[in-house]
Amino acid sequence: MIFDTIIIGGGISGLTSALILARHGRRVAVVEQAKEPAPLVRGFHREGIYFDSAFHYAGGFGEGEVLDLFCRYLGLNEKLTKVPLSDQSYDVFRDSETGREIAFRRGVAALRESFSKSFPEQAVGIAGYLSDLEHCCRTLPFLNLEASAVDWNIGAAMQGPSLAEVLAGRIGNPELRHLFSLHTLLHGVFPQEVSFAFHAGVAVPYYHSACRLAGGGRSLAAAFVGQLAVSGVQVFLGRGVKRLCFSSAGSLSGVELGDGETLACRECLVSIHPRRFLDLVPEGALRPAYRKRLMNLEETVSGYVLFLSGPRRPQLLAASNLYLGPFGSGTDGRLQSLERRPLFVSGAAPAPGSGTECGWTVICPADWGEMGIATERGRGGEEAYLAAKEAVVGRIVQRLKREAPEIVDGARVVAAATPLTLRDYCGGPRGGIYGVKHGIGQYNPQAATRIPGVYLCGQATAAPGLLGTMVSAFLACGQIFGHERLRGEVLAWR
Amino acid sequence: MTDQEIIELINSSLIEEFELEAERMTPDAHIYQDLGLDSLDIVDMVVVLENAFKFKIREGDGVRDIRTLGDIHRFVIEKKRALEGRTA
């Protein structure tokens, strides 16, 4: 049995690629190290309560929007129940100091109108900024299915200007600049470091529509599993990949698994961390310059994640996410003290008909290594690590009690993750919450590699989030089938 | 740095990072036809030059017009002189 394509890594980008390839009649296999596919998004149960770990909400998921079309095309749509967040306030930003709230309303026009009411002296700047943002997003292939992916120049779009530069040129009010910067939490790169175009590509789909999934990330994983089964994709679980194999003539011949078994294939899609891709190929197959580039890719910020549950579901979180932070703090391209960082608070929607209680999640950005020696369990010891973790969790809970008492009253922390946890689960050596960052001055790998038949996908090549990782799969498969052909096929589902 | 020193650093960096043969590194060598690079290598070339000379190359600097090793030499020398002029 020779597979046409073997996909290494069964996360969202790998599974999306598998479904695209299978639709084209390919014999496809997915190899995933974890015991279940899509291990990161499927969340976990603790004390009978479901918690989402990686998926909280998605943008561009409204009827006929890009993520919706992807899901229709992939056959996932009937298996998913979208739960739109509030049109009036899908994201609520609350000032840590004054308690003042500003809501993001659905749709760019509504957002422009409501922000212009809150900041009347900035109305011209707001209109200009949002128009630039939307225009920029429209130029990105596979985010705007009308745009051709053929002539797109990735370098020009991603290397500048920065979000901070564009905001400084358009918006005079520092508080408003800060508000427009808070959605950088969706990609984990500071406004000074992220290109305006990349930020537009991530943020604008959320401005258009913001949805949760009933049952959270677990239902997303289940939808993929169901569709893989009917697509005839073979899935190898609990199996790591040791190396790619090549024939004596130098062409790709298969994949050797950790247990020694070899699967024969003609093509390979690598959806794991780009750094780990290097371990799979012989030294001479890639040039030193490319190896070094992949080795030196920087990661996004890391984070602390608190999982809470309580006797009642906070009303505010029913149809909104809450962002907490001092509006006036500004962002100077580094993390401030734990008390002044932005916090993201979100709760999963229960699975339909289950009535199961769901917990909610608090995410606080963090730097790798800021827990000091305790970051390395080996050196600091398990006790030092746990003490440092408890101290951090305590400080975040104190903040929540001050800034969002209606959410934390009566609630308790059921579990918590640190940068070390993120490193171990997500595979980024420095615990990057979104893995490899997309920052100005960094050149992320693209789908094509120098090895014929070997392609990369995953958030490092396109963007993070459900939409970003799916786009990465379309870009990788576009290398195989042609971008225009794939784009046309997805458009047919409109 | 003299022009000659710049050229030598470019050549030695490219030889190492792209595993090129030293005797092929003549100014009229075409980077695709003679040195065997392809469009995928251009980003890596940009990163190699940025690291060797500690400057940032931005889109619009003219990287896409580069065809020969001599073009690379001229590109870096001009870029370096422009930056020195700015700080002088």
Image (cartoon, grey):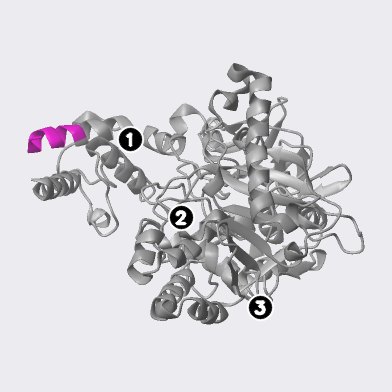
Q: Position of residue A361 (x, y in %)?
A: 71, 50
Residue at 14% across, 42% down: B27
Which element type, helix, strand or loop, lies under badge 1?
A: helix
Give the magenta range. B1-9
Disc 1 marks which residue? B18
Disc 2 marks which residue? A329
Q: Name the subunit of mark 1.
A: B
Q: Position of residue B63 (x, y in %)?
A: 25, 53
Looking at the image, which is closer to me, B75 or A41? A41
Q: Name the subunit of mark 2.
A: A
- Give residue B44's mark: none
Residue B2 lies within the magenta run = yes
Q: Nearer the viewer, mark 2 or mark 1?
A: 2
- Give residue A494's mark: 3
Looking at the image, which is closer to me, A451 or B47? B47
Residue at 16% across, 38% down: B26
- Image quadrant in which the C terminus of chain A is located: bottom right
